[in-house]
Image (spheres, grey):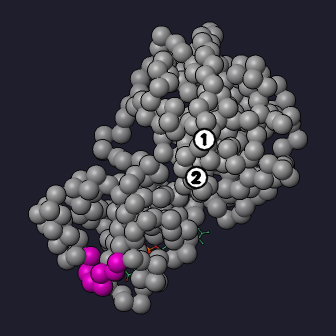
C-alpha cells in the first residue's frame, strides 16, 4: 500500500478551509495518510487530523514561509517517509511552493489545479486555456505530486483514531531566494475561496465605482466580494474576483448575486453555496431558478435597503 502525503496549509496559524478537501480525498483513497504541518504546537490541529496515520510536525525557530526551506523540508519528507503521492491545495502559496518541491524530488511529476483525480487508473484532469478545455494526464514518474482546486472535492467530516506524531526539523539550506518585503493589498480583501459570505456583482452593476455599494454590505457581513466574468471583462472588477468556470470556485454559506443573470459558467463556480440570494430586475433571469431567495427589482434600490436592514439587526 502506497503512502500518501499532504501539506496542511496554515494561514495566520489556522488551518485553511480547503485542507478538509485534500484530507477527505486522501483518507478515502485507502492509502496510509501522512499530514505535514509546519508548527511548533501541533495540538490545535489534531482534531481535524483524526484518521490519518501520521502527523509530521515540522519544527523550527522561525517557521515563516520561506520557499527554499519549505521545499527542501518537504522533499526530504517525501523521501524519508517513502511518500508515493503528495497533495496540497492549489492556493497562492502552492503555486510558488509545489513546483519547487517537484523539482527537488527525484523521479517526481507535478500536476496543479486538478479537478478530477483517479489514483487507481493514474488519471488526473485539469482545466487549460482559461477553462475552455479539460485535459487528462497520467504521470509516469514514480512520485506523483498534485494540487487540488479548492471547493471542488467533497468533504467528509470526522475520522476515527488519533494519529502518531513524528517531528522533523525545518531544513535550513542556503536560501536561493531572499524575501525582502511582503506588500499586502491595501483593500481589506477576503479570500473568496475561504469566505463564509460572498456578495457578487455582475454586468448589472454598470460601473466600477458602483461596487462600493456591495462593499458597504460586505463590510457589515464580513463578506468577500465576487464578480461575474462580464463584470471583469467590462473592467468593473478585477480577475481575482471572478467566480465561475474560468474564475474561482467558491463554497460560502451565503452567496448574494446582484445583477448577475446566472449563466451556467457562473453557476458552476458557486452552485455549492448553502444559500443563494439573487437580486435581478428581470423576473426571467436564469439565476432565479437556482436561487433559494430572489428579489425581482433594481439592485440600486434593493442593495441600499438590504444594507439598512442589516445595520438594524447586526
Ligand atoms: C468558456 C467560457 C467561460 C466562462 N467563464 C465564466 C466565469 O468563470 N464566470 C462568469 O461569471 N462567466 C463566465 N462566462 C461568461 C458567461 O457565459 C456569462 O456571459 C456571464 O456570466 C454573464 O455575466 P453577467 O450575469 O454579469 O451578465 P449578463 O448576462 O449580461 O447579466 C446581467 C444581469 O443583470 C441584470 N440587471 C441589469 N441591470 C440591473 C439592475 N439595475 N438591477 C438588477 N439587475 C440588473 C440583468 O437583468 C441581467 O440578468 C464564461 C463563458 C465562456 C464561454
Between residues 177 and 290, which one lies in front from this camera angle? Answer: 290
Q: Residue at x 41, y 23 (%)?
A: 181
Q: Which residue is mark 1?
A: 160
Between residues 179 and 59, which one lies in front from this camera angle? Answer: 59
Distance, label 2 to label 1, CA atoms, is 12 Å
Dot 2: few (<14), some (14–19), or many (≥20) neighbours within 10 Å?
A: few
Q: Position of residue 167 (x, y in %)?
A: 60, 16
Q: Is residue 270 left or right of residue 185?
A: right
Q: Residue furthest front?
A: 161
Q: Which quarter of the image is occupied by the C terminus?
A: bottom left
Is the residue 114 above or below the residue 185 in the image?
A: below
Q: Which residue is mark 2?
A: 156
Q: Position of residue 22 (x, y in %)?
A: 62, 44
Between residues 74 and 161, which one lies in front from this camera angle? Answer: 161
Q: Is residue 153 left or right of residue 45?
A: right
- Magenta segment boundaries in residue numbering: 293-299
Is the residue 101 above or below the residue 203 in the image?
A: above
Q: Residue furthest bottom?
A: 284
Q: Residue at x 66, y 24 (%)?
A: 74
Q: Is residue 94 visible?
A: no
Q: Position of residue 232 (x, y in %)?
A: 44, 62
Is the residue 268 above or below the residue 212 in the image?
A: below
Amino acid at each position: 500500500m502506497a503512502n500518501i502525503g499532504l501539506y496542511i496549509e496554515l494561514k495566520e496559524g489556522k488551518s485553511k478551509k480547503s485542507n478538509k478537501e485534500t484530507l477527505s480525498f486522501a483518507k478515502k483513497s485507502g492509502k496510509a495518510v501522512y499530514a505535514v504541518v509546519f508548527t511548533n504546537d501541533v495540538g490545535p490541529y489534531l482534531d481535524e487530523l483524526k484518521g490519518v496515520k501520521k502527523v509530521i510536525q515540522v519544527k523550527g525557530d522561525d517557521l515563516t514561509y520561506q520557499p527554499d526551506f519549505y521545499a527542501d523540508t518537504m522533499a526530504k519528507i517525501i523521501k524519508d517517509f517513502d511518500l508515493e503521492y503528495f497533495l496540497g491545495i492549489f492556493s497562492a502559496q502552492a503555486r510558488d511552493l509545489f513546483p519547487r518541491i517537484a523539482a527537488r524530488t527525484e523521479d517526481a511529476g507535478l500536476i496543479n489545479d486538478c479537478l478530477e483525480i483517479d489514483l487507481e487508473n493514474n488519471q488526473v484532469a485539469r482545466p487549460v486555456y482559461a477553462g475552455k478545455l479539460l485535459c487528462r494526464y497520467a504521470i509516469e514518474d514514480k512520485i506523483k505530486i498534485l494540487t487540488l482546486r479548492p471547493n471542488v472535492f467533497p468533504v467528509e467530516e470526522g475520522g476515527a483514531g488519533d494519529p502518531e506524531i513524528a517531528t522533523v526539523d525545518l531544513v535550513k539550506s542556503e536560501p536561493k531566494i531572499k524575501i525582502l518585503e511582503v506588500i499586502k493589498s491595501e483593500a481589506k480583501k477576503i479570500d473568496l475561496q475561504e469566505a463564509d459570505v460572498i456578495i457578487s456583482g455582475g454586468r448589472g452593476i454598470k460601473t466600477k465605482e458602483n461596487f462600493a455599494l456591495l462593499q458597504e454590505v460586505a463590510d457589515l457581513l464580513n463578506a468577500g466580494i465576487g464578480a461575474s466574468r462580464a463584470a471583469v471583462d467590462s473592467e468593473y472588477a478585477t480577475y481575482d474576483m471572478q467566480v465561475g468556470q474560468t474564475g474561482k470556485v467558491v463554497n460560502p454559506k451565503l452567496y448574494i448575486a446582484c445583477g448577475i443573470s446566472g449563466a451556467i459558467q457562473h453557476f458552476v463556480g458557486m452552485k455549492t453555496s448553502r444559500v443563494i440570494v439573487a437580486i435581478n430586475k428581470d423576473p426571467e433571469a436564469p439565476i432565479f431558478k437556482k436561487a433559494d431567495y430572489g428579489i425581482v427589482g433594481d439592485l440600486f434600490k434593493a442593495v441600499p435597503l438590504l444594507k439598512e436592514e442589516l445595520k438594524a439587526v447586526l
